[in-house]
Image (cartoon, helix red, strand yellow):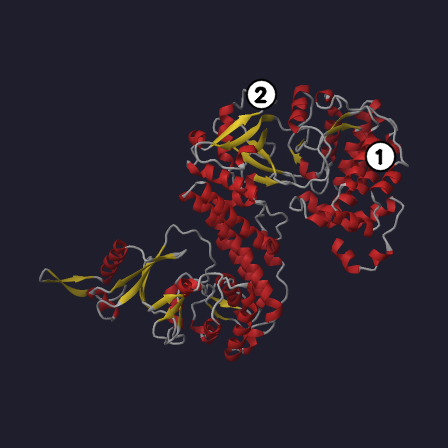
């Protein structure tokens, strides 16, 4: 850009044109000639030099060059250490002979020397084995980068580790950079999609926290993107291979370069060990200390590569649906997302990978919402629905509003998508509706051992009609949604949903506030008052035969049935730990009795995440009523205390207020019976939480995570209360005890 004007001849008259204009004219010619190759970040054109440009770069007219144009609309899906590829190429010029030269660097594009040859990908596709000599040459390319002196490279970002041999710090830095450069910029647009797929917002940050200690290796220049498209086999064999596309180069642990190469080259499994050995042999000749701890530490870099790849892979799959939205493209996007989630599940600690049917529906809703750019009037062309007559049309939320809510559902931001043990919940603001609503969909193939007995919509309708002081959502719609006018999507036709009023904060930037550390005094009072109000709801609407059997006997039968239907693996481990099988458990439970009390409608699952703090006399809103049942009101209160951290003074306060507020028919003999209910809930948790540990079911829900994290204490309390002891055989396996703890 700083070169003097170049004299040109135009129609026989001498003129002067600045180099910037010459290059821009050449770029225009490249774009007219058409694109010759496309990467994720650049469009590349191969053109013969015009005479004006040849003079500027010092080459012969007609010599081929590569014009690289940065895509302005490319998603930020890569980690960049330096923004300027030309600086990197200048640093390695003269040290590495097998790289292109940057001839010109301009705003938005660059001209590189042309590398004569064919890409490795054109003669050896992904997944195919690479010839042994060629593989060793590739390992040599990776090792040769260690010859570049760090002092010749551009300045490193301020976040870089100061100790340039600290492998652990480097991998932690990579994980944080993946979060800041890939996840965060894309989260406003794709965050809701990631949340629906079960990827938490802090997954990469938590990955950085878990990076273990590793052997020290001296940092060096890394290509960081050496795959089959970026390797050129030269025609004359001098040198045999060229390494192109250095824009993602970085400076750090050489083992990272090997890991990215292994993953992105897609070697067949049987060849990977051979590649590692070839790399180690080549690196020993250049920098022996770089191979320290390879066998132990390579897996950590491979895990990181799989983890960070989830984000670009999911976003590219979703973005592909913007260009083509038919069943074939949806199938391909679904398969790509499933592969990415399965590969990244372990390093990202994803508790549940959705099945293909669930992924397909999530992608469909996301794409349908994006189809019309946020204009609700076009919803009828994307999503239709069939109402369930059990919930009539609401005057303040008519069927037209339901259509708009279904259309907007897929575009809900991550802060408004909540994934629980059984439901995916999306909070929507529908134009023309003065309050937010929540679209609730049951997860596919959800493994929930504890049964639901009542229809949630019927329970909420009964509470609403009773006009009692219970803060609960209101049911606005119930039905099934499906595609309309796009294509015949196979699994979306039976996708049931419910729409409730949303009971969290109106500010879209705030999340619901749950009493996860226990209730405050006024919240304890508010909850007891609402439990008292529930006794005035006509439970006959939802369970006409309730109360005919003794509640404790019924509760015991349900627990025995649950234990008897656990998977074989869960039952075996339960017996190993000293928990009784179903017949023996029935004998133990039958030793206890409780007094008969009048039945009432119960919430059934008052854990902290089903309570939302509010600023009025009610103090708490009770959400998620799918476990509601009719039974002894004492059980609802005691189960809440079991599921929620409850200080003794709060427990005494709640019992005292509960006894005063409820009629005597609901409270008689409670002092003798409450410990029996606490005991049976401890025993229930011993089985249910063990099964969750074995199967992984529901572990992405916060209430489940907290329960299984304290399983060792639950097991000890359960076996002790059952009058049993942990088997000696289990005590002999301290590693199992540590795992359960």
**Mark 2 highlights which residue?**
392
Q: Residue at x 86, y 36 (%)?
A: 676
Query: x, y percentage for residue 155?
Result: 44, 67
Q: Residue at x 37, y 54 (%)?
A: 71
Residue 723, label in figure: none
Q: Nearer the viewer, mark 2 or mark 1?
A: 2
714 up-or-down from 524: above or below:
below
- Judged left or right of residue 66, residue 189 is right
Q: Distance between the residues labelled 2 and 1?
A: 40 Å
- Judged left or right of residue 265, residue 686 is right
* Quarter of the picture holding the C terminus: bottom right
- Which sits in the foreground, 457 or 159? 457
Q: Quadrant of residue 600?
A: top right
Q: Is residue 147 visible?
A: yes
Query: x, y percentage for residue 220?
Result: 49, 71
**Other-residue count near label 2 (Cα within 10 Å), few / some / many at <14 / 14–19 / ≥20:** some
Residue 674, label in figure: 1
In the rendered image, the residue lying farthest to the left is: 12
Q: In which quarter of the image is residue 549?
A: top right
- Judged left or right of residue 491, residue 697 is right
- Which secondary structure, mark 2? loop
- Which sits in the foreground, 250 or 17? 250
Query: x, y percentage for residue 194?
Result: 54, 46
In the rendered image, the residue lying farthest to the bottom is: 285
Query: x, y percentage for residue 709?
Result: 72, 50
Q: Is residue 646 visible?
A: no
- Which secondary structure, mark 1? helix
Q: Residue at x 45, y 60 (%)?
A: 80
């Amino acid at each position: 850009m700083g070169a003097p004007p170049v004299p040109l001849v135009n129609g026989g008259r001498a003129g002067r044109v600045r180099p910037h204009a010459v290059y821009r004219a050449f770029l225009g010619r490249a774009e007219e000639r058409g694109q010759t190759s496309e990467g994720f970040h650049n469009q590349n054109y191969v053109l013969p030099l015009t005479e004006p440009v040849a003079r500027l770069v010092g080459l012969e007219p007609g010599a081929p060059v590569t014009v690289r144009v940065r895509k302005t609309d490319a998603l930020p899906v890569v980690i960049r250490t330096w923004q300027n590829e030309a600086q990197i190429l200048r640093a390695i010029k003269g040290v590495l002979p097998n790289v292109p030269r940057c001839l010109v660097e301009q705003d938005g594009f660059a001209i590189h020397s042309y590398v004569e040859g064919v890409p490795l990908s054109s003669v050896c596709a992904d997944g195919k084995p690479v010839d042994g000599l060629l593989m060793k040459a590739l390992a040599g390319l990776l090792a040769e980068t260690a010859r570049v002196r760090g002092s010749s490279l551009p300045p490193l970002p301020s976040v870089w580790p100061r100790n340039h041999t600290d492998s652990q710090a480097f991998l932690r830095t990579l994980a944080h950079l993946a979060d800041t450069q890939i996840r965060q910029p894309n989260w406003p647009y794709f965050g809701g999609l990631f949340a629906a797929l079960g990827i938490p917002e802090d997954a990469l940050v938590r990955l950085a926290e878990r990076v273990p200690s590793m052997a020290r290796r001296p940092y060096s220049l890394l290509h960081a993107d050496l795959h089959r498209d970026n390797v050129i086999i030269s025609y004359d064999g001098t040198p045999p291979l060229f390494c192109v596309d250095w824009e993602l180069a970085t400076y750090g642990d050489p083992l990272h370069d090997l890991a990215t190469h292994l993953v992105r080259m897609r070697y067949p499994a049987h060849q990977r060990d051979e590649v590692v050995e070839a790399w180690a042999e080549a690196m020993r000749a250049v920098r022996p200390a770089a191979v320290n701890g390879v066998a132990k530490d390579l897996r950590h870099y491979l895990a990181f590569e799989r983890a960070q790849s989830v984000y670009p892979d999911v976003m590219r799959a979703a973005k592909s649906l913007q260009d083509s939205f038919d069943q074939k493209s949806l199938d391909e996007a679904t398969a790509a997302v499933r592969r990415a989630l399965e590969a990244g599940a372990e390093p990202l600690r994803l508790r549940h990978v959705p099945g293909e049917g669930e992924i397909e529906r999530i992608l469909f809703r996301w794409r349908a919402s994006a189809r019309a750019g946020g204009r609700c009037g076009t919803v009828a062309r994307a999503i239709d629905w069939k109402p369930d007559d059990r919930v009539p049309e609401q005057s303040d939320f008519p069927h037209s509003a339901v259509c708009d809510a279904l259309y907007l559902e897929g575009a809900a931001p991550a802060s408004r998508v909540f994934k629980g043990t059984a439901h995916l919940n999306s909070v929507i603001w529908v134009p023309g509706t003065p309050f937010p609503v929540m679209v609730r969909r049951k997860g596919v193939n959800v493994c929930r051992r504890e049964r639901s007995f009542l229809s949630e919509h019927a329970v909420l309708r009964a509470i609403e009609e009773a006009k009692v002081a219970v803060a609960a959502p209101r049911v606005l719609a119930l039905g099934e949604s499906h595609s309309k006018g796009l294509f015949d999507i196979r699994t979306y036709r039976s996708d049931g949903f419910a729409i409730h009023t949303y009971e969290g904060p109106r500010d879209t930037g705030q999340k619901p506030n749950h009493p996860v550390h226990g209730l405050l005094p006024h919240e304890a009072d508010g909850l007891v008052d609402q439990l008292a109000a529930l006794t005035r709801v006509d439970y006959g609407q939802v369970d006409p035969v309730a109360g005919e059997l003794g509640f404790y006997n019924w509760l015991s039968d349900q627990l025995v049935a649950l234990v008897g239907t656990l998977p074989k693996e869960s039952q075996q481990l339960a017996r190993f730990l000293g928990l009784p099988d179903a017949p023996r458990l029935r004998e133990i439970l039958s030793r206890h009795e409780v007094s008969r009390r009048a039945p009432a409608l119960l919430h059934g699952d008052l854990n902290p995440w089903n309570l939302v703090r509010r600023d009025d006399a009610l103090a708490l809103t009770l959400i998620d009523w799918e476990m509601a049942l009719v039974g002894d009101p004492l059980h609802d209160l005691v189960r809440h205390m079991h599921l929620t951290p409850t200080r003794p003074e709060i427990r005494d306060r709640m019992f005292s207020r509960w006894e005063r507020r409820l009629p005597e028919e609901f409270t008689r003999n409670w002092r003798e019976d409450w410990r029996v209910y606490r005991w049976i809930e401890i025993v229930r948790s011993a089985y249910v939480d063990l099964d969750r540990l074995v199967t992984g079911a529901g572990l992405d829900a916060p209430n489940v995570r907290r329960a299984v994290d304290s399983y060792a204490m639950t097991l000890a309390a359960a076996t002790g209360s059952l009058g049993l002891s942990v088997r000696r055989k289990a005590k002999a396996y301290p590693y199992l005890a540590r795992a359960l703890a």
